[in-house]
Amino acid sequence: MIDTLPLELVDLVIGRLNPNNRVERRAIGNCGLVCLDWCRFSRLHLFSQVTLSDSNIRAFLEVIQNSAYPILTFVYRPCLAFARPGASLDRLIEKLGPLPGATVLWCLIHPELVFFHHTAHLARICPELTHLTLANPDFSYRYEPFEPPPPYSVQYPLPMHFALDALQCFPSLTCLAFELHHSRGVIYRFPIQLNTLDLHLHRSSLEDFFKNLLSMDTIPVFSSLYLLGISPTPETFTGKYLRYVGDRLRRLRLDMRSLHLSGTCAEVLHFSTGLRYLDLQAVALFPDTFLSQILPSLPAPTSLT
């Protein structure tokens, strides 16, 4: 790879151009270089955000091995986008870390990539991580020319256990986000403040999420919940979690507009006595007694919409 890079990039990665060397002196003139030593900011600008994939990770590792500079210390925002899993790829990823300066990581989670089945591996690569975005791959089926494309694509669900592990493996984590392709690019963010989360989940994944959450030895307490497409009745895992959190929940948004019947969540909300903000959205009308059931449990002042 080094032989195919422009000389000015070779100098940036490997070291200092030698003005006494005729070839390098000619390169300085041809490229219009005005400095012989690249400053730290130049290397930081080039390597601060690095996207690694199946096609370039070997070349990047070669650059690291041949550089006289600690290239990995300049990486602050790595992006790992591996679509073709395999044992050899796992070994290459293990050679990458650690990235001591990396605080932001975007990661494509492939269900067959063994390396990403264990969050601890990522924790070794990015020990100081504060922002983590997990994305699930979306590979469309191939179709013949002049034939209409199928109305579906291959979509892999994002393993919820990975999110739960991330909360424990990254002690400095302040934001965990899901980038789910089947949700039309919506990003669900989880900013963490003092063991509290602002949780955004859709019906397709939140029941599984709360089921796993309630099975943890130490259950995280979320201060703000935004739940889509579900009415948290007492028998649901979502309802059971709301009962567990109780008065520690401060903000709650329930979007039940996709449901034909809103159901009754009054029994669950009876335990949410610490709410400062409550937003209920539904197409079906709530029972006449709904507000009279929940209002006595809400502290004042509470914003109710």
Image: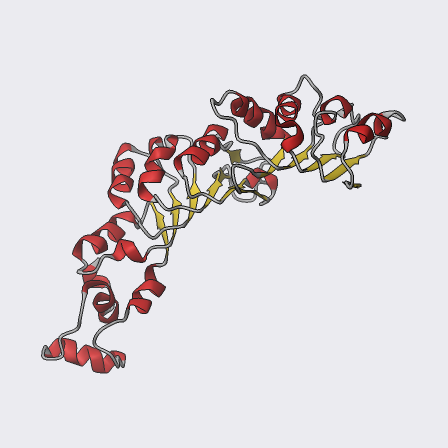
Q: Which of 185 and 41 is in front in this view?
A: 41
Q: Which of 24 and 164 is in front in this view?
A: 164
- Which quadrant of the view contains residue 43? bottom left
**Residue 240, percent from left and from top:** 64, 21
The residue lying furthest to the front in this view is 300
In the image, taking residue 51 as reference, residue 227 lies left or right, namely: right
Q: What color scheme is it? A: secondary structure
**Residue located at (65% from left, 34% from top):** 249
Give the quadrant of the N terminus. bottom left
- Which quadrant of the view contains residue 223? top right
Give the quadrant of the C terminus. top right
In the image, taking residue 217 as reference, residue 69 lies left or right, namely: left
**Residue 170, percent from left and from top:** 40, 39
**Residue located at (31% from left, 39% from top):** 124
The residue lying furthest to the right in this view is 288
**Residue 121, percent from left and from top:** 33, 36
In the image, taking residue 105 as reference, residue 221 lies left or right, namely: right
Q: Which of 86 and 135 is in front in this view?
A: 135
Q: Which of 9 and 192 is in front in this view?
A: 192
**Residue located at (67% from left, 34% from top):** 228
- Please say if 29 is above or below 70: below
**Residue 184, percent from left and from top:** 60, 43
Tally of numbered discs: 0
The residue lying furthest to the top in this view is 235
In the image, taking residue 32 as reference, residue 134 lies left or right, namely: right
